[in-house]
Amino acid sequence: MGISLNPSTLLSGQGIDVSTVVNEILQQQSGPLQQWDNEQITLQSQANLITAINNDLNSLATAVNALADPLGALSAQTAASSDTSILNASADTSATAGTHTIVVSNLATSGSVYTGSVADANASFLTGGATTADLTLQIGGSSGVTHDIQITQGTNDTLSTLASYINQQNWGVTANIVTDANGSRLSLATQTTGTLGAIAITNNTTGLTFSTPSGGQNASLTIDGVPFSSASNTITSAIPGVTLNLTGANANETVQLSVGPDTSQISQAVNTFVSAYNQVISDINAQFTVNAATNAEGPLGSDTALRTLQSSLFNDVTSTVAGDGGLVNLSSLGITMNDDGTLTVGQTPDGQSFAQLLASNPGVVQNFFQNATSTGFANNFHTDLTNLTDPTQGVLNVDLTQNQAQQQDLSKSISNFEAQLTAEQQQLTTQFSQVNASLQEYPLLLQQVTQTLATLGGTNSNSTSSSGPTLTSGL
């Protein structure tokens, strides 16, 4: 469409709107910018989708790796106690499945001792006019370490100041003041259980009286009939791979401890894999689904990299492995494929649920996903996913790199074209400003020409009248 100017105003002295004329000219020449901007928007939308799918693909790789990891969820063990009020336990992957009988006769205890009551915890307990005294603690039994406390009037001769003094020494002893209706008492308790935590008062010239020390004994128990002693109520060395936490004692009760595969963790890991796989497949399906309103696929519908990824994932998830107990593919575990390519944890061909199969033979399930030769389902899938998600060679990472290169090329083209338009804008503005100046001067020039012509016309008329010949007619 051409640029139109109003002839009636051009010669009136109003001139032209230079900015408007220049912008209209540039607008007609800037057509490629809109197309490039639209392409840039499309490329960025595709990049966002590729990144999102790639993130979900990495989540799938993490989920599959958990199934392939020999120290991961599939090898997790659990320990269940028949009476958690006596003991509870946990097991690591090195634990051996089995059942143990345990009898806990007594718990490991810390040592404690306390004074008789005094009326005022802030009054001196020195008697008979004494200004000093001596108090000796022994920690760890008869062969333990002794700590001599010199009592000095005005320094540590009250229950409060003595407690503060002991707490500052880092002897592994905690001192507290206990106050009730009978008065205040100093309580001393060791921070270590077992015989090493036994406490005794071996010397006392303070005037305070102390109770008979208590505690400071090891836990005593039998495991499968074998006597066991522990300075701690947390025992890690009795059953390989199992940690026992003693919570109570009853010499007349036998607790059953069952150690075996943690089917809860295994089931969760498998369901996490299925969920992650379904997310990626749903991402891909969304791009290949034709929108009924627009009759078009998603922004990545023509992306060959996405087709390659889809084909690779389908090949992986439908692959078979050397079977153990008939488990050769996901379907034999009760994990079936839906019409849209997603997976569902359902029933095995013989009618068992995956949970039932796992409960009856967890070892076979583990062997399907991973084995000593690294040829299990998860082993193979993990290898492929490692390639698919490679930071530089992964199918979607390559796709994203190409997308970013296209965006950079477009940005450069847009930048160069805009620079060209800017230069042309400056040139056109200069040219039309000169034209506008001439048009604005036109009325004045026209007036001057008219006046000049008028003057010339008057001069010719007078000259003719005064000097022209006079003609007469004779008879």
Image (cartoon, rainbow, N blue to C red):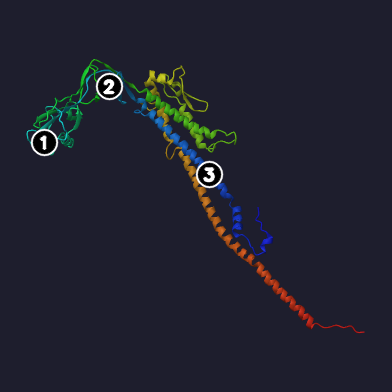
Q: CA distance from mark 2 to mark 1?
A: 44 Å
Q: At which x and y percent is residue 172? A: 18, 32
Q: Nearer the viewer, mark 2 or mark 1?
A: 1
214 and 171: which is toward the camera: 214
Name the element at disc 2. strand
454 above or below 384? below
Q: At which x and y percent is residue 340? A: 52, 28
Q: Which mark is residue 41?
A: 3
Residue type at tag 3: Ile
Q: N-terminal of the two: label 3 or label 1?
A: 3
Indicate the quadrant containing the C terminus: top left, top right, bottom left or bottom right.
bottom right
Q: Which residue is mark 2?
A: 87
Residue type at tag 2: Leu
Label 3, residues with CA under 10 Å away: few <14, some 14-19, many ≥20? few
Q: How many marks?
A: 3
In the displayed orientation, state which residue is furthest to the top. Answer: 252
Q: Which mark is residue 180?
A: none
Q: At which x and y percent is residue 105? A: 22, 19
In the visual, does 416 lie left or right of 150?
Answer: right
Q: Which residue is mark 1?
A: 151
145 and 162: which is toward the camera: 162
